[in-house]
Structures are given as C-alpha cells and as structure tokens.
Image (tube, grey):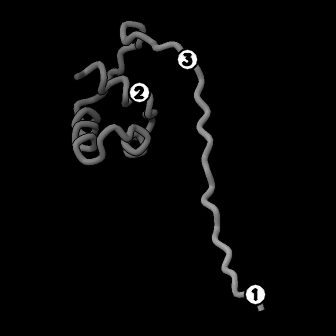
Amino acid sequence: MDNHRRTKQPKTNSIVTSSSEEVSSLEWEVVNMSQEEEDLVSRMHKLVGDRWELIAGRIPGRTAGEIERFWVMKN
C-alpha cells in the first residue's frame, strides 16, 4: 500500500484584463425611475452595496448598468 497522501493543488484563476477607455458620465443617458424604484434602489444599496446585478434582479425591466448609472448620477 502507498502511504503517501496526495494533496490537491489549488486552481489558479487567470485574470484577463482589457484596456478600455473610461467613459465620462456626461456621455451617459439619464435614467428615469419611479419613486418606488428609487426607494428600492436606495434600500437595496444600503443592504448590499454596489452589487448592481443583485439590485437589478429585484426591479423588473431594469439592467445592472441602468441601476449603476442612476446611482452614480444621483450621488
């Protein structure tokens, strides 16, 4: 019998970065939201922070990009 234990080597994740130009907020289209949506975004942001995908999942018809753009332009 082989008494040597094999240890698993942790997988290394390679991070691929792309060089993209930063877009000025002046080029962003204004996102209009109802008062209910604004309240929900504010409450969710207090709970989960900048997790835009999670917040957008709670607001039908909204994308994470729209939520983030609304938040950045509001604050």
Tell me where residue 60 appears, x and y as whole percent: 42, 40
As drawn, the residue found furthest toward the right would be 1
Q: Is residue 10 left or right of residue 64?
A: right
Q: Residue 20 got which mark?
A: 3
Q: Residues within 10 Å of mark 1 (few under 14, many from 20)?
A: few
The image quadrant of residue 64 is top left
Nearest the viewer among 53 and 60 is 53
Q: Are marks 1 and 2 in contact (CB under 8 Å)?
A: no
For the point 64% across and 67% down, the residue is 8
Q: Characterize the local packing of mark 2: few (<14), some (14-19) or many (20 or more) Cα atoms within 10 angstroms.
A: some
Check contact, mark 1 vs mark 3: CB within 8 A.
no
Q: Residue at x 37, y 23 (%)?
A: 69
Question: According to the image, label 2 marks what residue?
Answer: 66
In the rendered image of this protein, does residue 30 appear above or below residue 71? above
Quarter of the C terminus within the rendering: top left
Of the two numbered discs 1 and 2 in the rendering, the one whose residue sits closer to the viewer = 1
Q: Residue at x 25, y 32 (%)?
A: 38
